[in-house]
């Protein structure tokens, strides 16, 4: 599974770099594309920061609940025989 994920990620990066190089040859920049759809790099960073500020406390709260549950299940699970 990790191989498939890494393979897909590598392919995505490779294609993204290729498309970026082609667009650069036509003098199309990131700022141009973002301006056409009504965004700015600053706005994207603000949205990312707001999302992170919302998600991080929820992630920590979930982890505080899930880690002890996982630990109890892990400790009470019978040992595997033969491996």
Image (cartoon, rainbow, N blue to C red):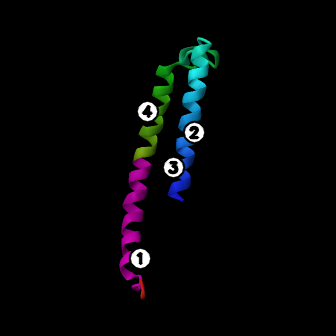
Earlier sequence position, callout 4 versus callout 1: 4
Q: Please say whether residue 54 is one of the residues in the magenta stretch.
A: no
First-in-chain label (3 vs 4): 3
Q: Which quadrant of the view contains residue 22?
A: top right
Q: CA distance from mark 2 to mark 1?
A: 37 Å
- Marked residue nearer the N-terminal end (4 or 2): 2
For label 1, the SS is helix
Towards the viewer: 3 or 73 = 3
Considering every residue shown, the one lying at the far bottom of the view is 81
Q: Position of residue 29 (x, y in %)?
A: 55, 15
In the image, is 5 to the left or to the right of 58? right
Q: Which residue is mark 1?
A: 73
> Is the stretch drawn in magenta largely helix, strand or loop?
helix
Tags 4 and 1 touching, CB below 8 Å: no
Q: Secondary structure at mark 3?
A: helix
Residue at image coords 42%, 87%? 82
For disc 2, the marked residue is 12
Circle 2/circle 1 CB separation < 8 Å? no
At mark 4, the secondary structure is helix
Label pair 4/2, CB-CB below 8 angstroms:
no
Label 3 and label 1: CA atoms lie apart by: 30 Å
Magenta-highlighted residues: 57-80
Which marked residue is nearer to the observer: mark 3 or mark 1?
Answer: 3
Q: Residue 1 sits in which quadrant?
A: bottom right
Q: Which numbered disc, 2 or 1, marks the residue that appears first in the sequence?
A: 2
Residue 60: x %, y % from top left: 38, 52
């Amino acid at each position: 599974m990790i191989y498939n994920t890494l393979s897909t990620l590598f392919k995505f990066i490779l294609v993204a770099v290729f498309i970026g190089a082609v667009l650069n040859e036509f003098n199309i920049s990131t700022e141009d594309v973002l301006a056409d759809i009504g965004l700015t790099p600053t706005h994207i960073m603000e949205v990312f920061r707001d999302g992170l500020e919302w998600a991080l406390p929820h992630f920590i709260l979930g982890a505080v609940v899930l880690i002890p549950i996982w630990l109890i299940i892990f400790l009470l699970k019978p040992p595997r025989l033969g491996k």
